[in-house]
Image (cartoon, helix red, strand yellow):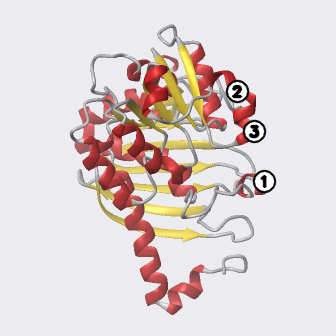
Amino acid sequence: MNVLIIGFGAAGKYYHQLLKKNKKVKKIFIYDIDNKIKNKIKENFTELNKKKLFENKITHAIISTPSFLHYKYSKILIDLNLNLMIEKPMVLNINNARKLVKLSKNYKKKCWVVFQNRCNLAIQKLKTEVSKRKNKIFYVDSKLLWHRNEKYYRSNWHGKYETDGGVLTNQAIHLIDSLIYLFGKIKKFQALLRFNKKKLEAEDFGILNFIHKSNIVSSVVATTRANENYESSIDVIMEKKRLTISGVSLNIFNKYQSHLKILEKKNSEIFSNKKGLYGAMGNGHKKILDEFLNENPKKSSYDLEIYKNLHILEVLHSIYNSYKVEKLKNIAFKQSILGKNEK
């Protein structure tokens, strides 16, 4: 089979590395609007039209463009009837997300969004444990303590609401997705967001409290202000048990016996802090790709179909919308949350 990658930035290059190692893939084609990239990869470059895709016998496509372009290219590829995999977030605009779900209903091909951490051994182990003891869980504490420098935010799209979003939409979306995947949909929330306008337009720090439909209470602390990528973690407190997932990409599973923390090696994967293959991006993309490139079945074992994943965008937009309303409604509240660099 032949595969098309749309967008050849960091994520596109990562998929290219993985696809080159997949024996099912005969040829990899690239589409990118950047002329510098076109010049570098002329032999594998293709135009995005029905004639060219048919000539090149392309059956599968991966969208790894900046987030604000996901909707544009998803619509084009649905119309061209290719199997489609979209990097997170599916899209930024909630109305566009609903339109895309509607368009894909009569779509006879795969249409997935990438939430690779669901594939981690640690997440899968915790999912099994949670299904056995859901009524025993009373609190879940989670954190994402990562670093993004000013150079990262000086790009023409990172850290802006119209093109990328802040820490919740870009980085912590994986953590919030894991909470929903493990403990169910969210019915209530509280949110506190903070901003460093010297670096980016959108939020770079957030504290969230959730009540899931299962009545489990969870909290999220997420930031890109840390000086290193320290961790992404989920700590599950039950009546007589405590389980944790840690590591930079939710990849280490621990259980507690009394006060002792014990690593379960068979349910953990060791990722480095580096980018690329075998780094912080982990093994999940490869597992998703293997499933995506399998011509049968259409369904994802990790529930990655876009119609199943509208809820996370609804939650994020509800948080942003409620926050804007509160700031406009309550001047005292507005003054209390804005610091020196947050005007």
The outermost residue toward the right is 151
Question: Residue 303, image x and y in percent?
Answer: 31, 34
According to the picture, the residue beneath numbered tag 2 turns out to be 41
Residue farthest along the top direction in this orientation: 23
Q: CA distance from mark 3 to mark 2?
A: 9 Å
> Which disc, if any, is residue 36?
3
Vertical placement of 306 versus 40: above or below?
Answer: below
Residue placed most toward the observer, 326 or 37: 37
Q: Residue at x 63, y 70 (%)?
A: 195
Q: Residue 107's x, y, as percent? A: 26, 36
- The quadrant of the rendering that contains the N terminus is top left
Query: Counting other residues with Cα less than 10 Å from the Cα at mark 2, is it few (<14), some (14-19), or many (20 or more)?
Result: some
The amino acid type of the residue labelled 3 equals: Lys
> Could you tell which of marks 1 and 2 lies nearer the N-terminus?
2
Task: Please state, as top left, top right, bottom left or bottom right, where the C terminus lies in the image.
Answer: bottom right
Give the structural element (helix, strand or loop) at label 1.
helix
Marks 2 and 1: in contact by CB < 8 Å? no
Q: Residue at x 59, y 29 (%)?
A: 30
Name the element at disc 2: loop
* Mark 1 lies on residue: 151
Query: Furthest residue to the front?
Result: 51
